[in-house]
Image: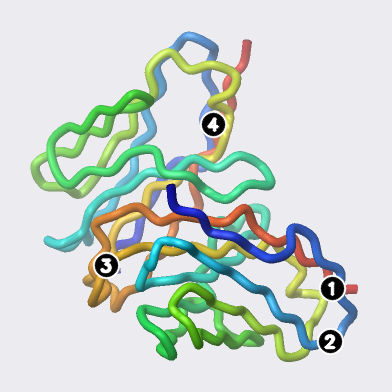
Amino acid sequence: LAKTTQPISMDSYEGQEVNITCSHNNIATNDYITWYQQFPSQGPRFIIQGYKTKVTNEVASLFIPADRKSSTLSLPRVSLSDTAVYYCLVGGYNQGGKLIFGQGTELSVKP
Amino acid sequence: DVKVTQSSRYLVKRTGEKVFLECVQDMDHENMFWYRQDPGLGLRLIYFSYDVKMKEKGDIPEGYSVSREKKERFSLILESASTNQTSMYLCASVTGRGGSYNSPLHFGNGTRLTVT
């Protein structure tokens, strides 16, 4: 199974760029990599998804090396409102349909 | 925009009661999931369903069952609630057949269940 490993927590300051790396050594050929953001008392919400190389949208970038065994979520110029838990999720097809989350990274942005 | 609706935001039940948590999605998604979330443990998969009347166990199915009689509705059932089932329960859905998901999960806002 494509288990994911992320740092448990990270601290940053407003205006800085934050990079959160997720390792997924057993990623399967069909698997996409998806990142979610979760605020307290809410369900996780989609941030970005990619398969290889680099993907960018209006809120984040996702960097995936050629071997796809890891991925890095990049949040440019974070603000206090980016304080949340971030999850990377890999898989589906190769896990019998299961979608298993890792423990997530708790990002704290300070003024 | 996809909407996943969980019937209750907060629920308080007594030990031994049978509890139903309901989830409805409006985008004709084939796949639906139930997770529970506890501090320090992240999201843990209880059950999922990839089609009507189909169900598969996740990592922590003990003490739970599910029902999917219609495509849009996925119910989580606690047959006899216990205090260790006090938790946040999250429902999610995604399109895709055969366990192949190339689209993001859509989550409800959760049901915080307290069992006393």
Quarter of the image that includes the N terminus of chain A: bottom left
Q: Position of residue B70 (x, y in %)?
A: 48, 82
Residue A51 to residue A15: above or below: below
Q: Secondary structure at mark 3?
A: loop
User: Could you tell me which chain the residue with mark 1 belongs to?
Assistant: B
Q: Secondary structure at mark 1?
A: strand
Residue for point 57% across, 35% down: A84
Please state which of the two labelled residues, at mark 2 or mark 4, is closer to the viewer.
2
Residue A82 to residue A78: above or below: below
Residue for point 56% across, 85% down: B66
Respond whether the residues carrying marks 3 and 2 are from the same subunit. Answer: yes
Residue A107's mark? 4
The answer for how far apart the CA atoms under marks 1 and 3 are is 35 Å
Please state which of the two labelled residues, at mark 3 or mark 2, is closer to the viewer.
3
Residue denoted by label 1 = B115
User: Could you tell me which chain the residue with mark 2 belongs to?
Assistant: B
Respond whether the residues carrying marks 2 and 4 are from the same subunit. Answer: no
Q: Are marks 3 and 2 in contact (CB under 8 Å)?
A: no
Please state which of the two labelled residues, at mark 1 or mark 4, is closer to the viewer.
1
The answer for how far apart the CA atoms under marks 2 and 1 are is 9 Å
Respond whether the residues carrying marks 1 and 4 are from the same subunit. Answer: no
Image position of A4 (left or right of B35): left
Residue denoted by label 2 = B17
Residue B96's mark? 3
